[in-house]
Amino acid sequence: MLQLPFDTVLIANSGEIAACIVKTLRKLGLRSAIAYHELDARTSAASMADLAIQVGGRTPITSYLDTGQIIAAADQARAGAPLPAMGYFRNAEFARAVTIAGVAFAIFAGAATALLSSASDLLTASTTWRA
């Protein structure tokens, strides 16, 4: 079994991707919490997750990309690791905010903030990643 510094992962995504993540977390012995927009309230992922937390916003996309809401939902769920929506995969500000909040970062462990901040300079990013 995995030995991680957290037992709950907050998923900031929807649809089949989120449902697959919930199933995978369950197989790994981890709890799942899902941040969902009201339009996604009846999705299979929202009903399958161990905990569902509604986040506001005009659209699901703006909700899942709202750093403050996602960190607040992670805190409410006592999730040690947020698994962000795809829009965050190149977002240094989110990685920085998660680090400041003291939350582990499920996708970008380690040098995440520095790597994402330097991603526009491939040589710097490469050097950062190797460190």
Image: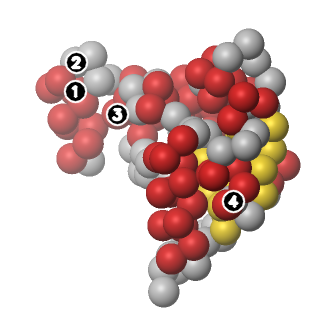
Q: What kind of element bears circle 4?
A: loop
Q: CA distance from mark 3 to mark 2?
A: 10 Å
As shown in the figure, which amino acid type bears the numbered disc 2?
A: Asp
Q: In the image, which is nearer the foreground, mark 1 or mark 3?
A: 3
Task: Tell me which numbered mark, 2 or 4, is placed earlier along the sequence.
Answer: 4
Q: Which residue is mark 3?
A: 115
For the residue pair 8 and 47, the one nearer the viewer reads as 47
Q: Residues within 10 Å of mark 3 (few under 14, many from 20)?
A: many
The answer to whether marks 4 and 3 mark residues whose Cβ atoms lie closer than 8 Å is: no
Task: Tell me which numbered mark, 4 or 1, is placed earlier along the sequence.
Answer: 4
Image coordinates for residue 33, horizontal then vertical, percent = 70, 55
The answer to whether marks 4 and 1 mark residues whose Cβ atoms lie closer than 8 Å is: no
Relative to 6, residue 84 above or below: above
Q: In the image, which is nearer the foreground, mark 4 or mark 1?
A: 4
Quarter of the figure with residue 113: top left
Q: What kind of element bears circle 3?
A: helix
As shown in the figure, which amino acid type bears the numbered disc 1?
A: Thr
Q: Is residue 64 left or right of residue 20?
A: right
The answer to whether marks 2 and 1 mark residues whose Cβ atoms lie closer than 8 Å is: yes
Q: What kind of element bears circle 2?
A: loop
Task: Tell me which numbered mark, 3 or 2, is placed earlier along the sequence.
Answer: 3
The answer to whether marks 2 and 4 mark residues whose Cβ atoms lie closer than 8 Å is: no
Q: Residues within 10 Å of mark 1 (few under 14, many from 20)?
A: some
Q: Is residue 8 left or right of residue 104?
A: right
Q: Which residue is mark 2?
A: 121
Q: What kind of element bears circle 1?
A: helix
Residue lying at the far left of the rendered structure: 123
Q: Which residue is mark 1?
A: 124
Q: CA distance from mark 2 to mark 4?
A: 39 Å
Q: CA distance from mark 4 to mark 3?
A: 31 Å
Q: Which residue is mark 4?
A: 49
